[in-house]
Image (cartoon, helix red, strand yellow):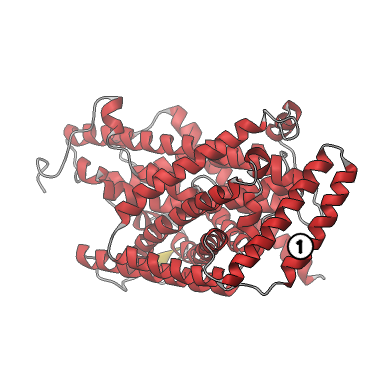
Amino acid sequence: MPETQATSPPPKSLVASLAHLGPGIILASSIVGSGELIATTTVGAEAGFALLWLIVIGCAIKVAAQVEIGRNTITWGRTPLAAFDRVPGPRLGGRNWIYWGWVAMTMLIVVQQGGIVAGVAQSLAAGVPLTVEGRAYNEARNASAAAEIEAAVAARQGESAAADAAREAFLVLDQAADELPTPRDTALWTVITGVVTAVLLAVSQYWLIERVSILLVGTFTLMTVLAVILLQADPTWAISTRELVSGVVPSIPPATDGRSPLTTALAALGIIGVGASELMFYPYWCLEKGYAKAIGPRNESQAWTARARGWLRVMQLDAWGSMVVYTVVTIAFYLLGAATLGRLGLRPEGSEMVRTLGQMYVPIFGEWIREVFLMGAFAVLYSTFFVAAAGNARLVTDGLILAGRLPDTDSSRASWVRRLSMAWALLAMSLALFFQNPVAMVLASGIAQAIMLAAIAVAVLYFRYRDLDPRLLPSRAWDALLWVSATGFLIIGGWTIWQKAGDALAGLLG
C-alpha cells in the first residue's frame, strides 16, 4: 500500500492531540464497575484504610505495560493476541503458553461478567421493581437498612441507648424482611439485561451506549469524589490524618473471622484500574481508532519513523489520561468504602451487594441518595458489561482465528465479533442466574487476572527488548518505569499463586 494512501501525519500540538484520544476513554468508562465499585470498596470495607497503598500501586504500575503493548501492536500492525503469541516459551497445539493462559482467564472473566449482570439486575430490581412482591421486599429491606445505619451512627457518636434501640429495631425489621418470599425481580431484570445487551451488540449500537455510559459514569464518579470531600465536613465520618497516613505506609492488616483482607486485595489488583483483560484488549481499540492505519505499514523511511513517533505520543497521552482518571476514581471508591462500610462493619455480598454499597452514600447525603445511587450503579456496571462484551468478543474472535477455527478476513472477523458479543452477553446472563453471588464471581476473575499479570510482565519485556523497532527506542526513564511495572506484575501474580496454593494445601490437610 503506498504511503500516500491511508496514512496521516500526527498532530503537532497538545490541543490537536486531544482530538485523537479515545481508546483510554473507552477503558475509563468500562473499568469503573467491577473493579472500582465492587472490588475496591469490598477491600476498603474489610481492611479499613490499611491497604490504600497497595491499591494506589496497583493502579499506577499498569500504564507502562499498557503503553508497551499498544506500541507493539500499532507499529507492527498486529492484533494484541497475535503479538502475545510470539513470546517465546512452551507451546501446545501450535499456540504458546500466554495464549492458553488467556483462554483460562477468559473462562473466569465470563463468570465475572455474570457477576456484573447480577449487579445490574440488583440495581434495577431495587430501583424499578417489576412485581408486587418486589416492591414489598424493597420497602422492608430499605427500612431494615435505615435502622442499621441509625444504629451504627449512634454507636460511633457514643449514644449507646439510641444505638441499642436502633439495633433492636434493625433485628426486628431484618427478620421481617427475611420472612418475605424472595421476589423474582432480580431474575427478571437479569434476563432483560442479557437479552437487550445481546440485541444492542447485534445491531452495532455501540457508539450510542458508549456516549451515554461516559456521561453517566462521569456523573456518578463526580458524585463519589464529592462524597469523599463532604466526608471531611462531618466529624463523625471525616478521615483523619492518622488514618490516611496508615493507609499510605505499607502494612498488612490482620485477618478477621478467618478472612484475610490481603487475599481480597490481591484478587482486586487483577481488575482495579486497567485489569489484565483490559491490558489485552486496549490495543484493539487503538487499532480501531486508526493509530496503526495512520502510521502505515512498517518500512525503512524517515517518514514512517516520524509518523510512528508522533502517533505513539498520542497513544501515550491517551494511556496516561486514562490512568489519571481510573486512579482518582479507585482512590475515591476505596476511601469511601473504608470510611463508611468499614466503620459500619458492612460487607457487600450476595443478593444484597448493591443495596449494601448504597449505604456508603447515606451518611453523607441522606436516605434520598439511595435512588440516585441505584441509577449510578446501573450506569457504571452496565457500561462495564457492555464494553467488556465488545472487547472480549474481539479477543475471542482473534483467538479462534489464531487457532485456525475461523478465516482471517475482515468480513469474517466483523461477523464473528457481532455473534460472539451476543453469545457473551447471553452466557453472562445465564451465569448470573445460576450463581447469584456477584462479589465472589467478580473476585474469582480477579484472581485469574492477577496471575495473568505475571505472564503480561514477561510479554512486555520481550516486546521492549526483542521485538521493538530500534528507531523507536524509549528513554531510560521509561525503561525504568517499565521494569517497575513488570516487577510489580510478577510480585502480584507470584503472591497470588502462593496464597492460592497455600489455601489449597490447607484445605487438603483439613
Q: In which quarter of the image is residue 50?
A: top right
Which quadrant of the figure contains the C terminus? bottom right
Can residue 493 be seen in the rendering of this structure?
A: no
How crowded pointer 1 is (Cα within 10 Å; few <14, some 14-19, many 20+) is rated as: some
Give left or right: position of 25 versus 273.
left
Residue 343 drawn above or below residue 197: above
Q: In which quarter of the image is residue 311?
A: top left
Give left or right: position of 95 versus 358.
left
- Nearest the camera: 392 or 1? 392
Check the image and name the residue furthest to the top. 13
Can residue 424 be seen in the rendering of this structure?
A: yes
Residue 40 x, y percent position in the rendering:
61, 47
Give left or right: position of 461 versus 4.
right
- Nearest the camera: 95 or 235? 235
Residue 72 x, y percent position in the rendering:
34, 45
Residue 157 x, y percent position in the rendering:
82, 37
Query: Residue at point 51% right, 60% down?
Result: 120
Give left or right: position of 437 versus 30.
right
Q: Mark 1 points at which residue?
A: 174
Query: Residue at point 40% right, 40% down?
Result: 67
Query: Residue at point 62% right, 54% down?
Result: 267
Q: What element carries label 1?
A: helix
Residue 380 x, y percent position in the rendering:
48, 51
Q: What number of labels is visible?
A: 1
Check the image and name the residue furthest to the right. 161
- Nearest the camera: 25 or 182? 182
Q: What residue type is labelled 1?
A: Asp
Residue 233 drawn above or below residue 495: above
